[in-house]
Amino acid sequence: MASSANRNQKGQSSPASYEILWPSTWRNRGSLVGPGSPEARHLTGRTPSLLAIHGFGGTPRDVDLLLDIAAKMGLAASAPLLPGHGTRVQDLISTRYEDWLSAALAEYRTLRKHGDVIVAGLSLGAVIAARIASESPAAGLVLLANAFWLNSPYPARFLAVAEQLPLPKNWWVPKLAPDIDDLERRKEHLGYDAQLIGSALEVYRMGRENRLRLGSITCPTLVIHGQLDKVCPASNAKRVVDALGTRDTRCVILANSGHILTRDRERDEVTRECHLFLARLVAQPTHP
């Protein structure tokens, strides 16, 4: 019989210590959760076309806002599903950031066959978009909640320590909720409910290794960031603008938005800024 010290006032057994530290509800984490389909999205239309790249652990639904703008403007557009995404988090184990970059580059080259391409991305997708713009002709660049630097101490310092440890590639931590300040919109986010640490390290490494490439970007650039972003600090916006090789920039900080600002409280402002930027490029296209 359990002692009274192991019983609560209703006579029920207290949870074991491991259940407090690692609840049983976490055991089945790793699923894709949220409404909608994770499939890639492609639009036919005129140029300049738009390549929009989703974030880490997310899906092309992260950048539907950008594809909707392109559709209204009659532009060709593509939002690919990055390798290891849209299924189960375990599928990320065998992927590296070079795999994500390669998939996005393949889509860029397909679009480029038909004319100028504007590249855009959210979070990890912003880093990938910037990398493409740094070494390939781009008509314009849109960086949303860029992940060139991560918040400290978490996740930046945590990942810096994890990078030095011999951790198994399949080690993960639960993701309790996406960083969307709008609670209703948070329920609509489609993405993984866990973070694979080995893959998060790839995001950390990609941001770190591509910062010096920002000076090679010479196309018009729009940078938008949420002030409430808990993943990537709002200071990333100015740091990126200062590092870019172009002075043709616009930097917008949204006071009431978290990390996934395409689905947060100020999504209408994101839509307006992106529409104005794309409309300008369509009216006065660049020819890199």
Image (spheres, rainbow, N blue to C red):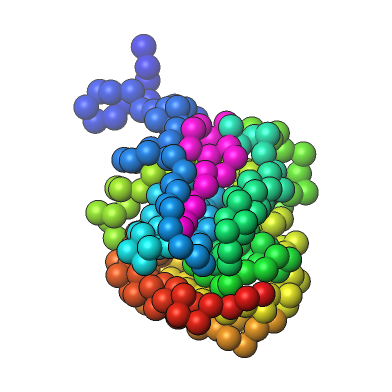
Relative placement, left or right, of 38 versus 123 is: left
Residue 279 percent coordinates (x, y): 41, 76
Q: Which residues are magenta?
A: 76-90
Q: Which corner quadrant of the image does residue 261 belong to?
A: bottom left
Q: Name the residue at 28% across, 23% down.
A: 12
At x 58%, y 67%, the residue is 116
Q: Is residue 100 visible?
A: no
Q: Position of residue 108 (x, y in %)?
A: 61, 55
Looking at the rendering, in which quadrant would you find the C terminus? bottom right
The secondary structure that most of the magenta stretch takes on is loop
- Does residue 81 show up? yes
In the rendered view, tell whether residue 74 sits above or below residue 10: below
Residue at 48 percent across and 37 percent down: it is 86
Does residue 72 appear left or right of residue 118 in this picture?
left
Q: Is residue 44 or residue 141 the one in the foreground? A: 44
Q: Residue at x 50, y 32 (%)?
A: 88
**Magenta highlight on residue 206:** no
Image side of residue 33 versus residue 102, left or right: left
Q: Position of residue 111 (x, y in %)?
A: 57, 55
Q: Quadrant of residue 207?
A: bottom right
